[in-house]
Image (cartoon, rainbow, N blue to C red):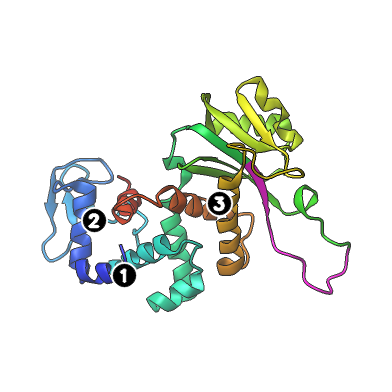
Amino acid sequence: MNITTIFKDFPTQESCVDHLEKVRWHGKPTCPYCNSQKTTPTIGERRYHCNRCNTSFSVTVGTIFHHTHLPLQKWFLAVSLILNAKKGLSSRQLARDLDVHRNTAWRISMQIRKAMMQSQQRELLTGLVEADETYVGGKPRKGSGGEKPKRGRGTKKTPVFGVVERGGNVKAEVIRDHDLSSKKISALVRRHVDVENALLYTDEFKGYVGIKKFMEHKTVDHQVWYVDGDIHTNSIESFWAILKRGIVGQFHKVSVRYLPKYLDEFCYRYNHRRTEGVFDLTIALAVGV
């Protein structure tokens, strides 16, 4: 859904609230504190009174929109802008687009990422699956001194491990302890892949040597070739390219603390790249449906 459609379908605060109530309650206002449907509308406000726990509430309670002072239309516009930005959207750009302070735009972005958490996707990957690791971090400033930074697996950047189902979904997570041992990687593969119904493709990194003990595994030696028939890791490397171009070109810098949330955003957008109604899905997740 683009911003033109947002302005057309949700021109007022009332229309936005109506949509949230429809998505969350399906016409039956339910107390978010005790789950009772014995509620009474409050006269003059879009709030309700719970007759069981004697509490006042609105449709935004317990959602990413709770305690907001911004019009919901701006929230809907932010969701649309972030979903349509393949390489991400910086908080400063979002602030310019919505005419809000950059700190407000940053909070909006982080709240929307809560609806994009990878924990929502619990299905294991099957079929042809590719696994790879990459390293995220900026280059040292010129003239900062010190030894020349190493590339690849010798770098001090933050490692990120990912698996992707060809033509399907991707999963990625930050390796905070920089542990890319065979034991650690095997555990990550078991966590995200249906090892009984999948064939895993990786490069020749020694951290993958233990995978053959519990599932079918083939490797491609990048020092010799990048593709050998169906054996390649082009899909996961394409995802890494999107991720890095987003971080370098849009966000410029992402701390290790918040990197998992940005990974959630990129994975969510990638996994729903062909999903019709992804805006409605995101709104439903945002209100906890």
Instruction: Report, in whole angstroms, how far the alpha carbon at label 2 lies from the one at label 3.
Output: 32 Å
Badge 2 or badge 3: first in the primary sequence? 2
Task: Rate crowding at label 1 as few (under 14), some (14 to 19) or many (20 or more) other CA atoms within 10 Å.
Answer: some
Q: Amino acid at mark 2?
A: Leu
Q: Nearer the viewer, residue 54 or 92?
A: 92
Q: Could you tell me which secondary element the residue under label 2 belongs to?
A: helix
Residue at image x 45%, y 50%? 268
- The range drawn in magenta is 132-146
Q: Amino acid at mark 1?
A: Ile
> Which quadrant of the rendered structure holds the N terminus?
bottom left
Instruction: Report, in whole angstroms, how far the alpha carbon at label 1 lies from the one at label 2.
Output: 18 Å
**Which residue in the structure is indicated by mark 2?**
20
Q: Please check the rendered image and state whether residue 139 is part of the magenta-colored stretch, yes or no.
A: yes
Q: Which mark is residue 239?
A: 3
Does residue 112 show up?
Answer: yes
Q: Main secondary structure of the magenta part?
A: loop
**Which residue in the structure is indicated by mark 1?**
3
